Amino acid sequence: MSRGRSTRIIHPLTRSSRKFQSLATPIYRGSTVVFDTLAEASERHGDPEQYRYGLAGTPTSRELEIRLAEIEGASQVLLVPSGLAAISLVMLGLAKAGAHILIPDNVYGPTRRLGQTFLNRFQVAVEFYDPLIGEGIANLIRDTTALVWTESPGSITMEVQDIPAICAAARAKGVPVAIDNTYGAGMLFDSFAAGVDVSVQALTKYQAGHGDLLMGSVATRDDKLGKRLAADHKTLGLGVSPDECALVLRGMATMPLRMKHIGAAALDVALWLKAREEVESVLHPALPDCGGHDVWKRDWNGSAGIFSFVARDWSRAQVETFVDALELFKIGFSWGGPVSLVFAYEGLPRPTPEQGDRLVRLSIGLEDVEDLKADLDQAFARANAL
Ligand SMILES: *Cc1c(COP(=O)(O)O)cnc(C)c1O
């Protein structure tokens, strides 16, 4: 029986050859995964290595997971639609009603909001601690503590945490430690060697590297913990697009080169800023003004492109004039792409509430460093003239 045209378009009699091997990872799109028999569908059930439904992964997303696991030395990586989704997966996965979670006080703003709103609604007690507490974390751990969250360096004020000391103290009490490892991108800091149980990253930043997509990852080494988070990942329905996985794979090929360049350029600009009259302090992990600088020297093998400086004696109007006068540095959130960015947060309570209003955060991109300095120089002149 000959089939109609619509049917033949959808079920073609012949297909192009699949024998094609390029060096790029193919983009496999698909919600439905088909099986030859019902028996095969049930055989694949519960086997995470097998494809069963697009939400649980495609060969494209698997390839990205494998490469990320290799960089971080993880045994499992889960991909989620954003860095923030990676954070919420870990928090929701490890918390339960009545539990207590410790979060550093300088944490990425949306992580704080997640703790204060969502987790509170489910009767999870969230306590914020001094990021430089080190082994002193032991005194804050309760019988109900389900997770110690860390982020190093911390957002905006860049404090470097003593992760080995925090992990040792938490391990002694059987409490898992998670790190927001976005700054190091799995390249500059070996979080698993330092003792963490879960390493979370915003791939949005250096892995994607071009400011054109959002994605996050949750890496684990422990099988039991990995299985638990994988089950919650599935339950919550956190899938990612294969097209975006392919873009991250493309970005990762140049990540070491980009990070090397950006790290050196950012340090160059940071030292240049430190020598300026207008600058009170430069909060860059490789500089002594930064909290935890000694820990950085001990534990890290480099620095990345984002840091802040506190201007001396500037009014808020001068801060705003400086930021608005910049031409190459664009005003915007996120970082890790080719374009340098700037932001100044109003009412920031850190390092002190008074200094917070004079803090400017810079993210160094791939422009010529001398042009970036010239841009900063003309903006300083505009702010000074006020
Ligand atoms: C950007 C960022 C995130 C969130 O990543 P998104 O992909 O933008 O959700 C989390 N943590 C840190 C430290 C970040 O800088």
Image (cartoon, helix red, strand yellow):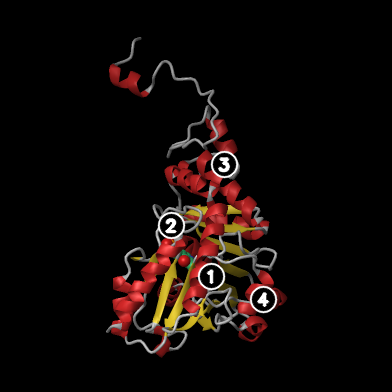
Query: Which of the two discs, 3 and 2, labels the residue nearer the N terminus?
Result: 3
Query: Which of the two discs, 4 and 1, labels the residue nearer the N terminus?
Result: 1
Q: Quadrant of ligand 1?
A: bottom left
Secondary structure under the numbered disc 1 in the rendered image: loop
Q: Dot 4, how many residues are within 10 Å of its Cα: few (below 14), some (14-19), or many (20+)?
A: many
Q: Give above or below for 3 relative to 199.
A: above
Secondary structure under the numbered disc 4 in the rendered image: helix
| Label 2, label 1: how far apart the Cα atoms are | 33 Å
Residue that mark 1 sits on: 95
Q: Dot 3, how many residues are within 10 Å of its Cα: few (below 14), some (14-19), or many (20+)?
A: few
Secondary structure under the numbered disc 2 in the rendered image: loop
Residue that mark 4 sits on: 170
Q: Are marks 2 and 4 in contact (CB under 8 Å)?
A: no
Image position, residue 353 (x, y; %):
41, 88
Residue mark closest to the camera, 2 vs 4 = 2
Residue that mark 3 sits on: 45
- Whether residue 269 appears in this view of the structure is yes
| Label 1, label 3: how far apart the Cα atoms are | 27 Å
Picture residue at 29% right of the left edge, 17% below the top: 5
Residue that mark 2 sits on: 337
The amino acid type found where label 2 is placed reads: Gly
Residue mark closest to the camera, 3 vs 2 = 2
